[in-house]
Image (tube, rainbow, N blue to C red):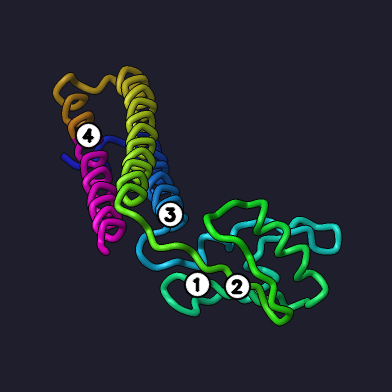
Amino acid sequence: MSIDSYGEEIKAACDTFENALEHAVNFVLSQFSDIRAGRVSPSLVEGITVEYYGTPTRLKDIATITNEDSRTLIINPWDVSIRPEVGRVLMAANVGANPIDNGQNIRMTFPALTEDRRKELCKQVRQIAEDGRVTMRNARRDVMQKTQKIAKETKLSEDEQKGLETDIQKILNDYIANLDSFLTKKETEIMAV
């Protein structure tokens, strides 16, 4: 039996559940992108907030951020007058490299990752993935409670209710398997020398 056959209220609750699962996976992926693997990514500094004419603004909205090589980022603010402020904020952000203002742009050269640091990053990535799984299981608990309440009101049979719970669990398992594949890919990326 598919979820569509249980009625509009249950279908709406399950759609909300799937949206929560999708949001959890996307959040985990955004957290993964902030963790440096072999190649330094501009996403390490894109979200850092800089005070720009009195307004907190993300660095990616006021500067060009590019890779010079696998370990070096070049940050080129569009407004030259804020370059010292950008350098100060990058220093305070403590992302693993010191910004060097050469008068034209800001250069950040990151050290190569040691094996211990790679293992530490893998632990961090696993923890992020586990937090995502916990969020997904909490969403499952919430949808189970909603659907059980609706099932009692609409007088679903026990077999239909068990089938619904099985369908919800299958959806969760699919999303967790998807998350686990992203985790494996990220760990492989981190451990590659």
- How many angstroms separate mark 1 from mark 4 (CA)? 44 Å
Measured as percent of width and height from the top left, residue 94 is found at: 59, 51
Residue at numbered disc 4: 169
Along the viewing direction, whichever of 60 and 142 lies nearer the viewer: 60
Select label 4 or label 3 by which is in front: 3
Q: Is residue 101 above or below residue 111?
A: below
Instruction: Tell me, yes or no, whether the two marked residues, 2 and 4, touch with CB atoms within 8 Å.
Output: no
Mark 1 or 3: the one toward you: 1
Quadrant in the picture for the C terminus: bottom left
Where in the figure is residue 16, as x and y percent of width and height? 41, 40
Q: Earlier in the sequence, mark 3 or mark 2?
A: 3
Q: Which residue is mark 2?
A: 107
Query: What residue did someone put label 1 on?
Result: 72
Q: Mark 1 touching mark 4, by CB under 8 A? A: no
Instruction: Give the residue number, with chain letter if any, for mark 3.
Output: 35
Residue type of the residue flagged with mark 4:
Gln
Q: Which residue is at 34% across, 55% downward?
A: 114
Q: Main secondary structure of the magenta part?
A: helix
User: What is the spatial separation of the Cα atoms under label 4 and label 3, in whole angstroms?
Assistant: 30 Å
For label 1, the SS is strand
Task: Look at the image and say whether residue 177 sits in the magenta stretch.
Answer: yes
What's the mark number on residue 99?
A: none
Judge the density around disc 1: few (<14), some (14-19), many (≥20) Cα neighbours within 10 Å.
some
Q: Secondary structure at mark 4?
A: helix
Could you give the CA–CA distance between mark 1 and mark 3, rounded to whole angstroms?
15 Å
Q: Are the residues at dot 1 and dot 2 in contact (C-beta closer than 8 Å)?
A: yes
Q: Amino acid at mark 3?
A: Ile
> If you read the primary sequence from the N terminus, does the residue marked by circle 1 or circle 2 appear first?
1
Of pointers 1 and 4, the one earlier in the residue sequence: 1
Vertical position of residue 163 compared to residue 113: above or below: above
Callout 2: helix, strand or loop?
Answer: strand
